[in-house]
C-alpha cells in the first residue's frame, strides 16, 4: 500500500474529526448560553459531577500533597532547603497538581460516564426520540453537562487545593518534624491569590474539556455495545491528552 | 384543499457511500389514512421513515407535510414540524433515567412547558388509553416487560394528540398475543385521533391489521401499493413472495 496514501487518509480523518469537534463544541456552547435551559437536568449533573466526585478528588489530593511534601523534603535536604516544603507544596498543589490531577481523575470518572450514558442513548434511539419530542439533544444532554462541569470542576479543585495542602501539612508535622503553626504561617505567607485563581481558571477549562469529550464521543457513538465501549475509551483518552495540552498552554500564559 | 396529501414525497434519494438505499421514492398519503410499508430487512424502510421524520436528510428530493417542504429544516422550525408527529420506536426508546409518567409526559414537560402536576395527569390518562394502570406511572422503563414498554412508547406518542403517527416495527420481539394487543391499540388510537399513520414492518399479521393501504419497498423503490385487502392477491410476484414468505421467487435473499 502506498505510504503517502495512508498518511493522506490519516490527515484527512484528523481534519474531519477536528472540524466535527469544533462544530460540536460551538453547538454545545450556544446551547449552554441561550435559553431554553433545562434546570432539573443541570441540577442532576451538578450533583453527579460535583458532589459525587468529592471522595475521589479528596483522596487524590491528600495523597498527592503528602507525597509531594516527602519528595520536596528529600530534594530540599540535599542543599539544606527543607524549610521550603510548605511553600513548594502550596505552589505545586494550587498551580499544577490540584487542577491537573483532579481533572484527570474526573476525566476517568465523569467523561467515561457521560460517553457511556449518551452512547447508550444513541444506540437505543433515545437521542432520535428526543428530536421527535421537539427537544434539542444539545440543549437537553450536552448543555447541562458542559455547564455543570465548568461550574463544578473549579469548586472541586478548590477543595483539592485545601485537602492537598493538608496532606502536605499532615506528613510534614507528623513525620518530618515541622511545627504546625509555622507550617501554616509559611504556607499563607507564600501563596498568592493568583496562584489559586490561575489554578481555578485551568480547572474551568479542564471541566469544559472533560464534558465536551464525554458528550462528543457518546453522541457520535455507533454500532452497539462495542461502539459505546470505544466511545468511552476515546472520551477518557482524548480528555486526558487535551488536559495535558491545555495545561501546558495555560501554564505558559500564566507564568 | 381536500385533495392535498398530508404527507408527500417526490424523488427522494438516500445513499450511504456506494449503498444506494432509496432510489427515487414518490409517495402521497391522504389525511387520516394508515399506510404500512412492508419490505425485507435492509431494504430502506427505516431510512425512509427517518427521512420523513427529519432524523436523516435525503440526498435529493422533497418531503412535504401539509404542502410545506420539511426536509432541510433545523432548530425551532424543525421542532414545530415535530410537534405534529408521534413516533413509536422499535425498541421503545424510553428514557431510562426517567419514570414511566415522565417518559409519557416528556413533550408536555420539556417542549410545551406544562406544569408537572398537570402533565402527570395527562400521562396517566394516556397510560389508561393503552390499558396500563396508574401504578405503572412511577416505575422505571427497565422494570417493564417488552410489551409494556411498547405500550408506554405508544402512550408517549399519543399524549400530545399528534396529527401524524409513525410506527417502526411495532410488534417486533413480541409474542403473538401481545403483538395483537399492540396492533389493536395502534388501530384504536390512530382512529380515535383521526391521525395519519405510517408504519413499517415485515410482520404481515400486523400489516393487515393496522393498514388501510400497504406499500412494498424493494431495492429503494416502492414497487407496489394498494388497499390492505388486496395484498394477498396483488398480482405482483415480489409482493406475493414476501407475503407467503417463500424462499423461491424474484427476491434474492443472501444465505446466512
Image (cartoon, coloured by chain):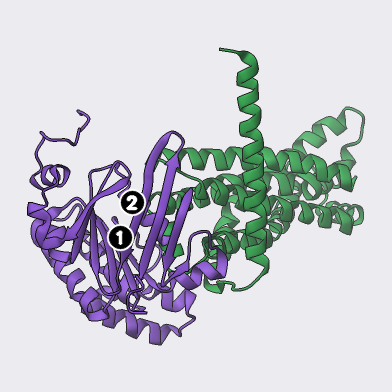
First-in-chain label (1 vs 2): 2
- Nearer to me, B190 or A110: B190
Give the crowd class for mark 2: few <14, some 14-19, many >=20 residues within 10 Å: some
x 14%, y 69%: residue: B184
- Could you tell me which residue is drawn at 55 percent across and 38 percent down? A234
Q: Quadrant of residue B122?
A: bottom left
Which quarter shows the N terminus of chain B? bottom left
Image location (x, y in percent) of residue A36: 59, 73
Q: What's the distance in space between the residues labelled 1 and 2, CA to CA?
A: 15 Å
Can I make out residue A87 in this image?
yes
Q: Which residue is mark 2?
A: B46
Badge 1 density bin: few <14, some 14–19, many ≥20, Cα 10 Å? many
Report whether residue A126 is seen: no
Chain letter, disc 2 residue: B
Residue A116: image location, x then y, percent: 47, 48
Which secondary structure lies at badge 1?
loop
Amino acid at each position: 500500500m502506498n505510504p503517502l496514501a495512508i498518511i493522506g487518509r490519516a490527515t484527512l480523518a484528523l481534519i474531519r474529526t477536528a472540524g466535527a469537534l469544533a462544530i460540536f463544541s460551538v453547538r454545545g456552547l450556544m446551547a449552554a448560553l441561550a435559553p431554553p435551559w433545562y434546570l432539573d437536568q443541570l441540577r442532576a449533573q451538578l450533583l453527579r459531577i460535583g458532589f459525587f466526585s468529592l471522595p475521589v478528588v479528596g483522596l487524590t489530593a491528600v495523597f498527592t500533597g503528602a507525597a509531594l511534601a516527602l519528595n520536596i523534603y528529600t530534594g530540599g535536604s540535599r542543599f539544606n532547603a527543607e524549610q521550603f516544603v510548605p511553600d513548594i507544596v502550596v505552589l505545586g498543589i494550587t498551580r499544577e497538581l490540584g487542577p491537573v490531577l483532579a481533572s484527570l481523575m474526573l476525566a476517568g470518572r465523569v467523561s467515561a460516564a457521560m460517553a457511556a450514558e449518551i452512547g447508550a442513548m444513541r444506540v437505543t434511539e433515545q437521542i432520535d426520540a428526543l428530536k421527535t419530542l421537539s427537544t434539542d439533544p444539545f440543549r437537553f444532554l450536552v448543555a447541562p453537562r458542559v455547564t455543570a462541569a465548568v461550574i463544578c470542576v473549579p469548586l472541586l479543585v478548590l477543595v483539592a487545593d485545601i485537602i492537598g495542602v493538608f496532606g502536605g501539612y499532615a506528613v510534614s508535622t507528623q513525620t518530618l518534624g515541622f511545627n504546625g503553626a509555622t507550617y501554616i504561617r509559611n504556607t499563607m505567607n507564600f501563596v498568592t491569590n493568583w496562584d489559586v485563581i490561575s489554578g481555578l481558571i485551568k480547572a474551568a477549562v479542564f471541566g469544559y474539556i472533560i464534558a465536551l469529550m464525554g458528550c462528543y464521543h457518546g453522541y457520535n457513538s455507533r454500532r452497539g455495545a462495542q461502539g459505546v465501549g470505544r466511545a468511552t475509551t476515546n472520551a477518557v483518552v482524548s480528555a486526558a491528552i487535551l488536559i495535558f495540552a491545555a495545561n501546558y498552554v495555560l501554564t505558559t500564559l500564566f507564568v | 384543499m381536500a385533495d392535498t396529501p398530508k404527507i408527500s414525497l417526490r424523488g427522494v434519494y438516500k445513499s450511504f457511500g456506494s449503498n444506494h438505499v432509496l432510489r427515487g421514492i414518490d409517495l402521497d398519503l391522504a389525511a387520516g389514512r394508515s399506510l404500512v410499508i412492508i419490505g425485507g430487512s435492509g431494504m430502506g424502510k427505516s431510512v425512509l421513515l427517518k427521512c420523513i421524520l427529519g432524523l436523516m436528510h435525503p440526498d435529493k428530493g422533497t418531503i412535504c407535510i401539509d404542502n410545506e417542504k420539511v426536509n432541510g429544516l433545523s432548530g425551532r422550525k424543525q421542532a414545530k414540524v415535530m410537534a405534529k408527529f408521534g413516533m413509536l420506536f422499535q425498541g421503545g426508546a424510553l428514557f431510562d433515567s426517567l419514570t414511566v409518567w415522565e417518559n409519557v409526559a416528556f413533550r408536555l414537560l420539556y417542549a410545551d412547558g406544562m406544569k408537572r402536576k398537570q402533565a402527570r395527569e395527562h400521562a396517566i390518562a394516556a397510560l389508561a388509553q393503552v390499558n396500563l394502570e396508574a401504578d405503572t406511572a412511577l416505575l422505571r422503563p427497565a422494570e417493564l416487560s417488552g410489551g409494556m414498554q411498547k405500550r408506554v412508547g405508544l402512550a408517549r406518542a399519543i399524549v400530545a394528540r399528534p396529527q401524524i403517527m409513525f410506527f417502526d416495527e411495532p410488534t417486533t420481539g413480541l409474542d403473538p398475543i401481545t403483538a395483537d394487543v399492540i396492533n389493536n391499540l395502534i388501530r384504536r388510537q390512530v382512529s380515535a385521533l383521526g391521525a395519519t399513520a405510517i408504519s413499517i414492518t415485515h410482520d404481515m399479521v400486523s400489516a393487515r391489521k393496522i393498514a388501510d393501504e400497504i406499500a412494498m419497498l424493494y431495492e429503494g423503490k416502492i414497487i407496489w401499493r394498494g388497499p390492505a385487502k388486496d395484498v394477498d392477491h396483488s398480482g405482483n410476484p415480489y409482493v406475493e413472495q414476501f407475503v407467503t414468505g417463500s424462499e423461491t421467487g424474484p427476491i434474492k435473499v443472501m444465505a446466512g
